[in-house]
Image: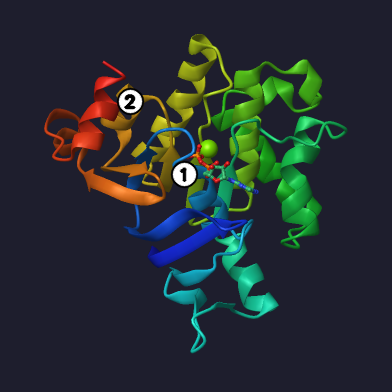
Amino acid sequence: MIEVLKIYKSFGGKAVLSGISLEVNKGEVVAVIGPSGSGKSTLLRCINLLEKIDRGTIAVENEIMVSTNANGRAEYADKKKLRDIRLKLGLVFQNFNLFPHFNVLKNITEAPVSVAGTRKQEALETALQLLEKMGLEDKAEAYPFELSGGQSQRVAIARALALNPDVLFFDEPTSALDPELTLEVMKVIRKLAEEHMTMVVVTHEMGFAREVADRVIFMDNGVIVEQGTPEELFTNPKNERTKMFIKGFN
Ligand code: ADP
Ligand code: MG
């Protein structure tokens, strides 16, 4: 589904991603863990075309988004192709990023109607179905300021799903939430996992990673230090840095 090969990214001369390679298979749930500043958000932002890489290859469903040209620089596909690729990817942020001046329904239907060209009526029907799935059918007319953090995040997830992405990325979806609200958001993500939605979840919730992920990736300092099944990584980490990091959560 997603293929990332030796990508590099620096900000102002500071290397943030240093040769990251990773694959995400259809139906797989991958958790990405690692200390703050290790490059997890940058990795998601690069795959989701919110940042440009310096070098390396990214492909989505065998469509090349970017690869390294003969001069050793990243060369991106044309606009139309990037737009098509972008529509296959959904991203949910830590801070929800809802449009404050739109109600919940409009937050969810805006992109399908104005970006993907979905008919308004169809977009509305989909939005209502998604709200029901998120347990928020009574919030269709509410504005973001009227929602709790957990409700806002579930609306953000519905909004991402409304574009019917092939892969959904989450960047610390619960780190702005109280424990109680964290649970309601994780429940929704767990449900999507049961439906075999392909997902990449950056998280500090080790219990969640352990329980829901098929594979866990530990990043530190711009590289993937270790990856494996939750069992391998949490019970029997091989790398010292992984051991130290996981210990910090026990
Ligand atoms: P993580 O999500 O693992 O905490 P980030 O990907 O947010 O890590 O950041 C990795 C490093 O890149 C940090 O040192 C951060 O300060 C730096 N960084 C991230 N985004 C930018 C940016 N837009 N400009 C400059 N530095 C950035
Ligand atoms: Mg981050």
Please report whichever mark, 1 or 2, sits nearer to the chain's N-terminal start.
1
User: Is residue 120 or residue 196 the one in the foreground?
Assistant: 196
Q: Where 242 sits versus 206, above or below?
A: below
Mark 1 — residue? 40
Residue 136 in view in this figure: yes
- Residues packed near mark 1 inside 10 Å, few (<14), some (14 to 19) or many (20 plus): many
Helix, strand or loop status at disc 2: helix
Residue kind at label 1, given as amino acid type: Lys
Image x and y of residue 221, in percent: 40, 45
Number of on-image labels: 2
Q: Residue furthest right?
A: 101
Mark 2 — residue? 206
Residue appearing at x 78%, y 16% in the figure: 146
Q: How is the image coloured?
A: rainbow
Image x and y of residue 70, in percent: 49, 89
Residue appearing at x 24%, y 35% in the figure: 242
Say which quarter of the image contains residue 81. Answer: bottom right
Residue appearing at x 29%, y 28% in the figure: 245
Establish whether ligand 1 lies closer than 8 Å to the Cβ of label 2.
Answer: no
Give the left or right position of residue 214, taking residue 52 as reference. left
Please state which of the two labelled residues, at mark 1 or mark 2, is closer to the viewer.
Answer: 1
Image x and y of residue 159, in percent: 66, 41
Say which quarter of the image contains residue 220. Answer: top left
Residue kind at label 2, given as amino acid type: Met
Give the left or right position of residue 155, taking residue 197 as reference. right
Q: Residue furthest bottom?
A: 70
